[in-house]
Image: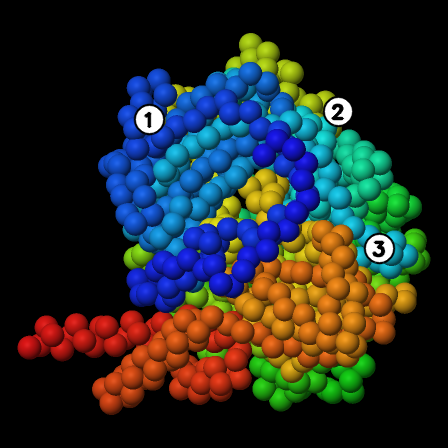
Amino acid sequence: MGVLFKMRLTIKWSIMKYLKIEIHGKILSKFILLGAMLCSVSLYGHKPKQKLVAEFDCTKDYPAETFFSYGDVHVSASSAGRYREAEAVPLSRFGYRFSVKSIGKPYLAVVRYPDDKRRFMCMMDGTTYDMTIGVFTGVNQPITNKMLEIQKVFWPRWNDCSIVFMTWSNGEPAAVADVKIYELDELLALKIENPDNQVPKRELGLQFEDPCGTSYSMGAINDQEWLDRTAGYMRYTGQKLLTYPIIWYHGPIYPSEREPSGYFGVVAGRDRKLYSRWTSHPEDWVSSLLKKFEKEGLEFQAALTLLRLGSLMQNMNVDLNSIKGGKDTYNNMLWNDNVQASAQDWTTEYNVQNFEKKANGTLKEWAYNENGGPYGKGVMFNPLHPTVQKAILGIIQEIVDRYGQSPAFKGISMNMWHATMTWFFSLKSGYDDYTIGLFEKETGIAIPVDPKAPDRFSKRYEFLTKNHSEVWVNWRCKKIKELHQQMRDIIVKARPDLRLTITMWTETSIPGWFGLPEKPEHQIFARKSLYELYREGGFDVNLYNNEPGIEIDYSMVPSRDRDGWGTSGTEMPLEKTSSFRDHDFLDHTTLCAVGNQKHSGAFIFDSWVEAWGKNSWFPCDPNDQQAKDLIVMNGKPAEGICRINSEYPKDDFWWDSQLRITPPFQGGNHYLEYFAHALAELDACRITRGGLFTDTGHAELMQNFAKAYRALPAEKFKTVGASTDPVAVRSLVSNGKRYLYLVNREYYPVKMKLQFNQKSNHLTDLASGESIKASGEMDLTLGPYELRSFGMSPESEANGFSATVPSEIISQLNQQLATAKVVLENLNKAKIDLPVGTGKLLSEIEIALNEGRYAWVRRALDSYPVRKADELIQVLSSNRKATK
């Protein structure tokens, strides 16, 4: 463990070990690779030296100064082994206290937990994000009945430490077998093979939604520590690109000369007290970051969550009576004769102008008097109005003027949310006098509505959507594309290699369209595809095919279905637990539209769960010297600081300062499922992942993927063979060299036989550097979600392959389909309405099974229509028994 190493562990098909794998409580498979199907089969790179400093056997008892618990916490056992388990109710928890000597050095927490049933566990130190990571098992993930591991790198900010394990939701108890804490040596940079540095390679990295937790994570007491550790961890795990907000909910968080700026963040002191700091005159932290990244060989993409700009907020006209009377507004006019005067969401309060009053308890109204109204979430400002476009293009110009010449700067990433001002978001928006006048002028279509009628906005909506819907939608998409092209032109004028990336962000947009996706009509096949919804809002993905300088990222959300913004767990209605995942994998229209882009990418958004308890902001004690020391942001004095804290039901946790917010991840190797999906489905040239803070709990998995992925050219490859399911094989000749990759979409190993056009072939494994000689055929086994990439001469070509899935998997999928057919037949006989598309889906599953598309089949059999039909038949059976 304590030395550098480079190796590949080759697993022979003949040495399989057997065990039961379950999903939804049913036996699905009887095999596992070497007794650890969900453990990595390929190891590259290096591991730092480790020194054990603390360990806990969770089945043993410890004194109160070392152990605490809340709820019915007990020792239990299963086929996975013995472990301590929290009560299966929200916020039940237990934890351990330990000491470390070296504050600021990297440490590793290795936690073994049972994968023996449905679980949703939050791990943390109880106060900060430093040790926070969540994990969930079961439901969409086959149960292994084995122990899995969390390996969390962290930097202690105090010597007296704690590690806490908490149940998040009903029926999904936290459980841990043992804990080991190691002090680590230096985290050295992972070496990425680059056989041709003249060819741009694929990008892998971090992406943040929230910029406020820098001094609340990574053990950082200041922004420089956060930057140093984030950059170091990126290099350690082979990640090169950081996409991070420089414009957030209320405008720039850098020192803008065009717009009011504002930056705030949370910090945890050495005594665990929590503070919030803010300033309207932030330091130019972006320049400092870019200089750091230039030295480290890293790259930065500026993210814009462009919901508001101060200049627009200051001068907006939201006086509805004056607008109805003919006065101009650059706010969006709505289908119901209202003006969008607010984003109508949680972001309103996060303006630094609110914070001093909030801390003092004197806050009466939001900054700029932003108030909601009788309308839903949406875009405040009309993206076609000249005033709005001037503000947007002006801020883009300022960003590239300030940062565009740094070699580390890659461009701008626009987050397309429900309230982003670079589109309309929905057909219910955009009926103001200016936009309608422009539409009539450019299309020649006259709208027969009195231009002075106070209800003209709703009448325009009714006329256009009933009589000219397609023309109206197409025109808006064209105009939005023109805006995006203007943004792109400013960016590439600063430097031709820069880009505008547009991220189709689903986790915020879906609730904007539907509220919580908790009804049958919100499910796959029942509602419109994401492509259609975005198009109605003014963004047609297909219009951007081959558009230079504009690239599109598709956002995927692995965990939102598991919490549904609540803690219901096993009691959560099925309608709340399906929509995001089903559309991530089965929304064929959207996936094809994004995949057809020349340089499409994927953003895997790690959403989080929040238990705020009784949260409060309050003034610092006048004698609080720590507060005086911490009122600094990026080396510059901040304008304000206050204490913050959350109160929860009392237990025996050793400190008062607490906060419980956790991004949960799929257990074991399932963490890689979305990486494999993005590459196999989209041929993604860029993959970013993240959300709230840097995930430091999957280093080895990331290293393995990074070495194979980042060696590939950032161009679309040609697909080998007729199918990409369960394995996608693709090839490309670039700059006189052939590249080849194979990626397994599934959690089980797949035996591959590659066929080449020549009898003698020489391949280089791009991850390990291993030289491989192959005849006209080559056998290999891809592990769970594994990616392998190769280099070869352009004359050698893989012209075919076969992929052999374990027979047990095929039998199980066939049995599931047969069961689903019987369920469908019985429900039809009972004249019970089925979810939309169930019959058609089962027919498509049968076809896909015959074609060997087992990855799609598994997701389809696990989708809402099939699961809902199973739920309905159980209800029918129970009712019949009760009647008897």
Residue beneath label 1, please?
Answer: 68
Residue beneath label 2, please?
Answer: 636
**Where residue 745 appears, x then y in whole percent?**
57, 66
User: Relative to the observer, which residue lies in front, 84 or 316?
Assistant: 84
Which amino acid lies under the numbered mark 1 shown in the image of this protein? Phe
Label 3: element kind: loop
Q: Earlier in the sequence, mark 3 or mark 2?
A: 3
**Where residue 514 appears, x then y in whole percent?**
49, 67
Which amino acid lies under the numbered mark 2 shown in the image of this protein? Lys
**Where residue 549 appears, x then y in whole percent?**
84, 64
Q: Residue at x 43, y 66 (%)?
A: 578
Q: How far, Cα to Cα, is label 3 from label 2?
A: 44 Å
**Where residue 220 appears, x then y in whole percent?**
63, 27
Q: Earlier in the sequence, mark 2 or mark 1?
A: 1
Residue beneath label 3, please?
Answer: 195
Q: Residue at x 84, y 45 (%)?
A: 408
Quarter of the rendering containing residue 17: bottom left
Tell me the quadrant of the picture where the C terminus can be found.
bottom left
Residue density around tag 2, few if under 14, some if 14–19, many if 20 or more, within 10 Å: few
Q: Establish if 160 lies above or below 20.
A: above
Of circles 3 and 2, the one toward us is 3
Which amino acid lies under the numbered mark 3 shown in the image of this protein? Pro
Q: How far, Cα to Cα, is label 1 from label 3?
A: 53 Å
User: Relative to the observer, which residue lies in front, 588 or 36?
Assistant: 36
Q: Earlier in the sequence, mark 1 or mark 3?
A: 1
User: Relative to the observer, which residue lies in front, 657 or 435?
Assistant: 657
Name of the residue lying farthest toward the left: 884
Residue 59 in sight here:
yes
